[in-house]
Image (cartoon, rainbow, N blue to C red):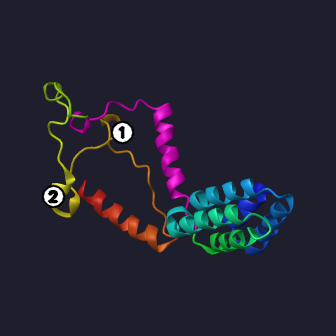
Amino acid sequence: VLSAFQKSIRGSDVDAALHYLARLIEAGDLTSICRRLLVTAYEDIGLASPQASVRTLHAIEAAERVGFPEARIPLANAVIELCLSPKSNSAIQAIDAALYDIKNRPIGEVPLHLKDAHYKGAKSLGRGVDYLYPHNYENGWVKQQYLPDNLIDQTYYEPKQTGKFEQALAQINGNLKKNK
């Protein structure tokens, strides 16, 4: 039922999601409902509508405070919003790709200029010496290498165009990559 619940939200089927929510409410499983709603908000709606995740958390907190039977009200609100929100799984895909590289590729060393330089002897080791502080540059950005040499051209985040927020992130990301 939990799987069908999440998949119905992901598929934007409000009626099916409410049906599975009702089954879970009848079973009295508030903990599983809340956990699955929060996971769904971040995994399936994500950056397409980040405020939906915030409102889902508020609905979960309200449901936990009032308990059943009234908990059904904020939970239903959250389910309906999540169903009808634009969807994006770009964040989970991005972190999973980065984790894959950590586990399966030679990842290399952190560039010296990014290593901590706040201790005696750091400078003699070349740590932090050539770091450029982005806030000292126009628009808070300066061209410098952040990824290890082995991953220098690696891309993890692939924005989706399903929501206005992520469209804005995609434009910023694209502009930064042009200047890289």
Location of residue 28 by image quarter: bottom right
Q: Per the image, is 107 magenta?
A: yes
- In the foreground, 31 or 112: 31
At label 1, the amino acid type is Leu
Dot 2: within a 10 Å radius of its alpha carbon, few (fewer than 14), some, or many (20 or more) residues? Answer: few
Asked if residue 146 lies left or right of residue 168, the reply is left
Q: Which residues are magenta?
A: 87-115
The structure residue drawn at horizontal position 73% and vertical position 67%, both measured from the top left corner, is 71
Compared with 38, 132 (above or below) is above
The residue to which callout 2 is attached is 137
Q: Nearer the viewer, mark 2 or mark 1?
A: 2
Q: Per the image, is 110 magenta?
A: yes
The residue to which callout 1 is attached is 151
The structure residue drawn at horizontal position 54% and vertical position 62%, both measured from the top left corner, is 46
Residue 98 rendering spot, x and y as whole percentages: 46, 43
Asked if residue 43 lies left or right of residue 63, the reply is left
At label 2, the amino acid type is Tyr
Dot 1: within a 10 Å radius of its alpha carbon, few (fewer than 14), some, or many (20 or more) residues? Answer: some
Residue 132 rendering spot, x and y as whole percentages: 17, 47
- In the foreground, 110 or 63: 63
